[in-house]
Image (spheres, helix red, strand yellow):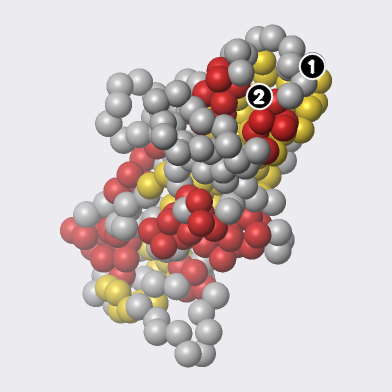
Amino acid sequence: MTGPGDKVLMLRLDRLLANLGYGTRTQMQAMARAGRIKLDGAALRDPALRVAATPEFCGRLSVNGEALDPPPGMVIALNKPCGVTCSRKEAGPLVYDLLPPRFRLREPALSTVGRLDKETSGLLLITDDGAFLHRIISPKNHVVKRYRASLARPLRGDEGEIFASGEMMLEGEDKPLAPAALKIISPTEAEVGVTEGRYHQVRRMFAALGNHVEALHRAALGDFALPDDFLPGAYLLLRVAEAEARIRGGA
């Protein structure tokens, strides 16, 4: 929400909607004149009208009878399925294909908060707020990423001690991993909490100890976990403050 001391960005109505990916400014002008853009149910027919680009105001707008998407400062919490890639250009299904097509046209553009590899499922955040993105992915901020791993072979028993040591090295690297927490779920299942985001980190940690991760699911970022019944491909739209509160345990 905006406070009394906050500076409110004012934009032409056609530009606001174009920035949110609804179409070109020319298309938005035509939609306004056709009465398809409404404020509290009343048509806004002047595309040059200057409006507040705030969540409060945008929450009162509708386009073609549907509520307007949130303005910049949006976070998407997606339950990423296996088989989709955190990319804009690679071949095959992409995480952005799971979202409304207009989301690709938003300005500022949406970016994933870190990445999950193609065969890893679970909580993925996507945002248009670069500062939020960097706060979450920076190892200095110690946001714990919790993963559930299904393993090909039973645990040896010393994995927890090795992961927590702060001395574990991955093949091809010259810097040890930060301490990571291991919680045993069953002989072939474990939950791992890491604060870094190295390439295929959890898979490589188990591989270094002679095991193989058959399935990997990100269960949470900090204290933010999606409900167990949240289907793959489903998503929530949040404001940055809401997402940050959930991650920090404030909601």
Residue 179 on image: x %, y %: 62, 42
Residue 10 on image: x %, y %: 33, 79
Q: Residue at x 29, y 48 (%)?
A: 105
Q: Residue at x 32, y 66 (%)?
A: 16
Q: Dot 2 corresponds to which residue?
A: 149
**Which quarter of the rendered picture does the C terminus lie within?**
bottom right
Q: Is residue 26 visible?
A: yes
**Which quarter of the rendered picture does the N terminus lie within?**
bottom right
| Alpha carbons under labels 2 and 1: distance apart | 11 Å
Say how many tags the image has: 2
How packed mark 2 is, by other alpha carbons closer than 10 Å (few <14, some 14-19, many 20 or more), is many
Q: 216 and 34: which one is in front?
A: 216
Q: 215 and 190: which one is in front?
A: 190
* Above or below, comparing residue 113 to residue 11 in the picture: above
Residue 110 as seen in the image, left or right of residue 170: left
How packed mark 1 is, by other alpha carbons closer than 10 Å (few <14, some 14-19, many 20 or more), is few
Examine the image and state in which quarter residue 25 appears.
bottom left
Amino acid type at mark 1? Pro
Q: Is residue 98 visible?
A: no
State the residue lying farthest toward the right: 186
Q: 161 and 38: which one is in front?
A: 161
Q: Dot 1 corresponds to which residue?
A: 187
Q: Disc 2 or 1, which lies upstream in sequence?
A: 2
Do callouts 2 and 1 mark residues in contact (Cβ within 8 Å)? no
Label 2 secondary element: strand
Q: Residue at x 63, y 55 (%)?
A: 247
